[in-house]
Image: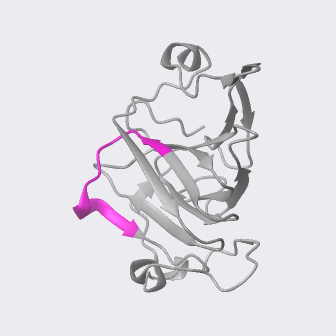
Amino acid sequence: MQIEETAIPGVLILTPARHSDGRGFFCETWNARRLGEAGITLDFVQDNQSLSHVPDTVRGLHYQAPPHAQAKLVRCGRGALFDVAVDARRGSPAWGQWVGVDLTPEDGRQLLIPAGCLHGFATRAPDTEILYKCSDFYAPDCDGTVRWDSCGIDWGLGGAPVLSEKDAAAPPWAEFDSPFTWPFTREGTPCA
């Protein structure tokens, strides 16, 4: 597994080794023992799948507040997406900064987003499928959203975004009272 650091502490790009032959390829997208040896010790408890039919669909910026804060490992199963993390950990050296990474099934890259970061993505192709692991179960009472266009992110959209009502009505970053602090210390969540 290739592990690449980003400008935000704890936000990592993971690229699994692929073993290819005439049939296709095989790869391990997550191996707790091997990644634990590299200092990444997350216990994922839920896998999610999302499908967006049209390009320029924007989902986010989402988070789940403590005590059910979630780290996520995001990959693209089909199509293409631009995946984004925003550091929302008060006191972090990267507070308010964002990182965006293009993910496709062809490149196999994954974005690891620690708890305490907002998450969102924009689709680049029709019928884009997003697959992601979460380190805590979905808790509706801890669910939150920050407006997608309020953090200075260059989404690279080709047209008007396709948004849910929830995402379109989300409060902007300037009004966000973050429940996260630096360092975020919940067991198993990398933050530095």
Query: Is residue 10 toward the left or the right of residue 64 in the image?
Result: right
Question: Does residue 137 show up magenta in the picture?
Answer: yes
- Write down the region rendered in magenta: 132-144
Give x and y (percent) for residue 176: 46, 75
Looking at the image, which is closer to me, 29 or 176?
29
31 sits left or right of 106 in the view: left
Query: What residue lies at 38% left-to-right and 38% top-to-bottom?
Result: 186
Asked if residue 44 is positioned above or below residue 182 in the image, the reply reads above
Q: How many marks?
A: 0
Residue 68 visible, this orientation? yes
Q: Quarter-wise, where is residue 45 in the image? A: top left
Q: Quadrant of the N terminus?
A: top right
Look at the image and tell me in which quarter the C terminus lies: top right
Q: Is residue 71 above or below residue 40?
A: below
Where is residue 124 drawn, in percent x and y?
70, 65
Q: Nearer the viewer, residue 107 or 36?
A: 107
Image quadrant of residue 109? top right
Q: Residue at x 61, y 80 (%)?
A: 149
The spot of residue 52 in percent (x, y) is: 53, 65
Which is nearer the eye, 126 or 159?
A: 126
